Image (tube, rainbow, N blue to C red):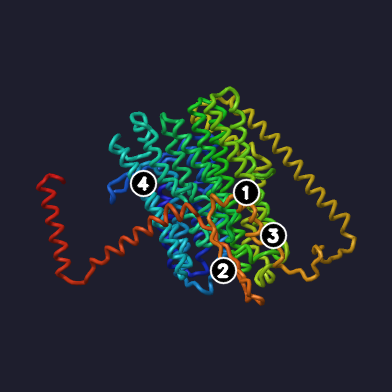
Amino acid sequence: MFVQVFIALILFSFGIFIIPRRFQFAYALTLTLVMAALTSYWAFDIMQGNRQFTHINFHVAALQSSFILVFDKLSAFFVLVVNLTVVVGLLYARGYLKPYCATKNTLSFAIHYFAFIWLYFSMLLVLACRDGISFLIVWEVMAVSSFLLVIFDAEDRNIMKTGINYLVQMHIGMVLLLIALLIVEKSTGSMSFDALADYFSQHSNWPLFLLFFAGFGIKAGFIPLHTWLPQAHPAAPSHVSGIMSGVMIKMGIYGIMRVLLSVQHDYLIIGIVLLIVSVISGVLGVMMAIVQHDLKRLLAYHSIENIGIIGIGMGLGVIGISMQNDVLIVLGFSGALLHVLNHSLFKSMLFFNAGSVYQAIHTRNIDSMGGLMKKMPFTALLFLLASLAICGLPPFNGFISEYLIYLGMFKSLEGIALYHSVLIVFGIVALTLIGGLAIFCFTKAFGIAFLGEARSPQAAGAKEVSASMLWPQAITAITIVAIGLASAWFVKPLFSMIADTYGIPVAEYVGFTKNLTGISMLAGIFLILVVALLVLRHVVLRHRPVRTGPVWGCGYTAATPRLQYTASSWADSYFKLAKPLLRTKVHNADIAEDEIFPVTKAYETHPEDAIKTGVVDAPVTRFLELLKKIAIMQTGQIQHYVLYAFVFMLLIFLLTYFQLI
């Protein structure tokens, strides 16, 4: 039945081009909800253990090929994550896209909704395809459809340039995956993920794993494979940014997990590589986020940070396999997978909030915001909730997944070898540093954007966005709180999945479920106390007159918003400490000694991604310079082109004659 419904939905998706604009959103939402309902039913059934997997094999005569679709517990979990975020993102898009009705035609909206639907369908197929050909096809569809979504504002030349850069890097990743799958086919005769176990049983595991890791790592955004991410997310519409960051980059995590399930040995090497790359991604991601002025760019770097946290959990799980440490296996992998869900929730909501702010004041520059909590109280409250969650603070969902990873590390320290202890302590220190820096960053982001006084006329005139942009975020907010208050209900299926995969007895993880239940009870008591205090405050103050007045201005009698902290001044002390690892351009016109009445001056800082500048931009610049030098051969004279052909044929003849080719 799935095949027939899916083919029907694919065919119906083309109908978006022939229906009137006023029905396009409803049409896209209907197709999305039908697919989400069908796949969620299967996914819940599989996650609850009612069936082990759903296997679909159908033959396409035109391509003379068979497509094998398999939904197991791993893919079922990711399906549920994708469905929730995509549905909420599409609901949010209705309000976000309304202002574009005056500038975009019907075809532009049709292409956008069509690309949205196909991005969703392609992600589901990525999670189900096992044979290499069909997987690479849907992987390419995912890249192209997301490219079309990124360039929604293609009239802006910079956005088009960013979209092309994104597409090129996605194709580099696909080429790496193609090479890896071809290596598997050459050895086993089958180009599929099901053949990986046979390959790994006969060969060294870490070289091929690293090839897969590079291909999937580009999509996930691990450093130094991340350079597309801080550019594409700010360029895309905010509902697209939320979906790309929330679930699309998790397709890279899914791919890495799928390969890890087939690995047979070399666990320690693979685990160390995963841990080191993930720590670098987490630490540098949050460090670069702190110095950003663009709100969406700041959130994009936090996606890299959270991918690092997920990678730390996976790396610890793999190291646990090498140690035969069941506790580290269960808690490491479960913490990583739960953080996949948690990050999809709070990061998508943060991007939706950033979109609401942009729609209200038409800028993403944090230094042009300020005082928005007075103008946009619901948006501010949602942003605050998501900020607390992403910082890993209780009683929200981010705390639970990071707690599992911490618990796995601390529980594994006793009675292990020295080098294993060093690795685990390294993970503890890194995760602690990431959490502390994340709190510092979102204190800055929320404080400067929503508190204080308006720093620009746009912020002063801001208004709350429509309800159609708020209530979809409320769905995400409720889920964030639910995971924090009922964590055992969400974590138990993950414990069961990891335990079944690696043959771990129930006794090894049932105690952790009870531990989470106790944490949830404490979190519930804390929330009840907070609500009770707020109600008590309201009761006590409701009959008292409210007086307003200026706060103490440290002796200043003519205070202005310019006396507040800016994004740069807030992070100035941090930047001085982190300067060896960060790169920032400063544009400042100094006042000369003889300049008694100085003219208007400006001081600007522009943070740069040092890895992008050194690893990507520098080689590309040198290559372009080489092409410019070669361009001298383009003389426009026919005799020169005939000479080039003659020299080429002569070279081939000589190489053949001397048996060099």
* Element assignment for label 4: helix
How far apart marks 3 and 4 lie (CA) works out to 45 Å
Say which label, 2 or 4, has the lower sequence index: 2
How far apart marks 1 and 2 lie (CA) works out to 33 Å
**In-front residue for pair 317/559:** 559
Which label is found at residue 176?
4
Residue 328 in the image: state x and y as whole percent.
56, 30
Dot 1 alpha-carbon crowd within 10 angstroms: few under 14, some 14 to 19, many 20 or more = many
The residue where tag 1 is placed is 438
From the viewer's perspective, is the residue at label 1 or at label 3 nearer?
Answer: 1
* Element assignment for label 2: helix
Residue 641 in the image: state x and y as whole percent.
17, 66
How far apart marks 1 and 4 lie (CA) works out to 33 Å
* Element assignment for label 1: helix
Task: Identify which residue is drawn at 50% across, 36% down.
Answer: 315
Say which label, 1 or 2, has the lower sequence index: 2
The residue where tag 2 is placed is 98
How far apart marks 2 and 4 lie (CA) works out to 40 Å
Dot 3 alpha-carbon crowd within 10 angstroms: few under 14, some 14 to 19, many 20 or more = some
On screen, residue 410 versus residue 652, left or right, reads: right
Dot 4 alpha-carbon crowd within 10 angstroms: few under 14, some 14 to 19, many 20 or more = some
* Element assignment for label 3: helix
The residue where tag 3 is placed is 378
Q: Residue furthest front?
A: 594
Q: Quadrant of residue 455?
A: bottom right
Task: Identify which residue is drawn at 32% across, 40% down.
Answer: 191
Are the residues tagged 2 and 4 within 8 Å (C-beta)?
A: no
Residue 559 in the image: state x and y as whole percent.
76, 68
Q: Which amino acid, mark 1?
A: Ala
From the viewer's perspective, is the residue at label 1 or at label 4 nearer?
Answer: 1
